[in-house]
C-alpha cells in the first residue's frame, strides 16, 4: 500500500482518471445525500391562504355546534325515556301490590298506595299537540311543526295517552 501512495506522486493517465472519477463521485455523494433526506412537512410554510384557513375554522365551528345540538337532542330523548320508564315502574309496582292484595284476600280492592291523583282537567297549553296527534302525525313531525323539542312532545303525548286509561281506572 505504501508503494501505491508513493506512486501517486507521478500518476499515469489511468490513475489520473481514476482519481478524477473518485473525486467526482465523492462530490456527487456529498451533494446528493442531504437532498435525499426526508424533509419535515411542518418546516415549509402553509400552502393554504388565510381565507382558506378561516373557512376551515368556520366549518369546524359549525360541526362542533351541530354535534352539541345532537348531543342535547339525544340527552332530551334519554331523559324522556327515563321518565317514561320510571312512570311504568311505578304503575307496575302499584298493580303488583293490588294483585298481591287481591290474591291474599280473594277480593279485588284498590291498592293501599294509589297513584297520584289524575285529574280530568284538560290542559289547554297542549291543545295544538293533541290536535296534531289526533290527525295522525308522529311526535317528530309535531316537534318540527311547532318548533319544540322532540323529547318534550313525546313525553306530553305519552302522558296524555296514559292519563285517559288511568282516569277511567280510578273512576271505576
Image (spheres, rainbow, N blue to C red):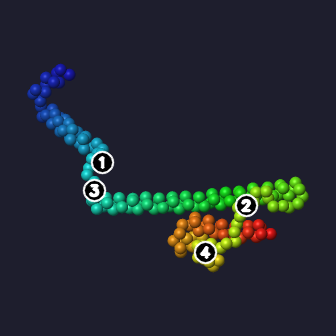
Are the residues tagged 2 and 3 within 8 Å (C-beta)? no
Q: Secondary structure at mark 1?
A: loop
- Which x, y percent locates residue 87? 68, 59
Determine whether, in the image, residue 92 is placed left or right of residue 150.
Answer: right
Q: Quadrant location of residue 22?
A: top left
Front: mark 4 or 1: 4
- Of the residues under marks 3 and 4, which one precedes in the sequence? 3
Q: Quadrant location of residue 54?
A: bottom left
Q: Secondary structure at mark 3?
A: loop
Are the residues tagged 3 and 1 within 8 Å (C-beta)? no
Q: Is residue 129 visible?
A: no
Q: Quadrant of the N terminus?
A: top left
- Which x, y percent locates residue 158? 65, 67
Are the residues tagged 2 and 1 within 8 Å (C-beta)? no
Q: Which residue is mark 3?
A: 47
- Of the residues under marks 4 and 2, which one precedes in the sequence? 2
Q: Is residue 36 above or below residue 120?
A: above
Outermost residue toward the left?
Answer: 10
Which circle marks residue 115 in the picture?
Answer: 2
Q: Quadrant of the C terminus?
A: bottom right
Q: Which residue is mark 1?
A: 42
Amino acid at each position: 500500500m505504501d508503494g501505491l501512495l508513493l506512486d501517486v506522486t507521478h500518476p499515469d493517465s489511468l490513475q489520473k482518471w481514476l482519481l478524477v472519477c473518485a473525486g467526482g463521485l465523492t462530490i456527487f455523494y456529498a451533494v446528493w445525500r442531504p437532498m435525499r433526506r426526508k424533509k419535515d412537512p411542518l418546516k415549509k410554510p402553509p400552502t393554504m391562504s388565510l381565507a382558506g384557513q378561516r373557512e376551515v375554522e368556520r366549518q369546524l365551528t359549525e360541526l362542533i355546534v351541530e354535534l352539541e345540538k345532537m348531543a342535547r337532542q339525544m340527552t332530551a330523548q334519554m331523559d324522556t325515556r327515563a321518565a317514561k320508564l320510571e312512570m311504568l315502574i311505578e304503575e307496575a309496582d302499584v298493580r303488583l301490590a293490588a294483585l298481591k292484595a287481591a290474591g291474599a284476600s280473594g277480593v279485588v280492592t284498590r291498592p293501599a298506595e294509589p297513584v297520584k291523583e289524575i285529574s280530568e282537567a284538560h290542559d289547554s297549553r297542549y291543545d295544538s299537540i293533541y290536535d296534531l296527534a289526533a290527525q295522525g302525525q308522529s311526535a317528530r313531525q309535531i316537534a318540527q311543526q311547532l318548533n319544540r323539542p322532540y323529547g318534550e312532545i313525546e313525553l306530553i303525548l305519552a302522558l296524555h295517552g296514559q292519563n285517559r286509561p288511568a282516569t277511567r281506572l280510578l273512576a271505576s
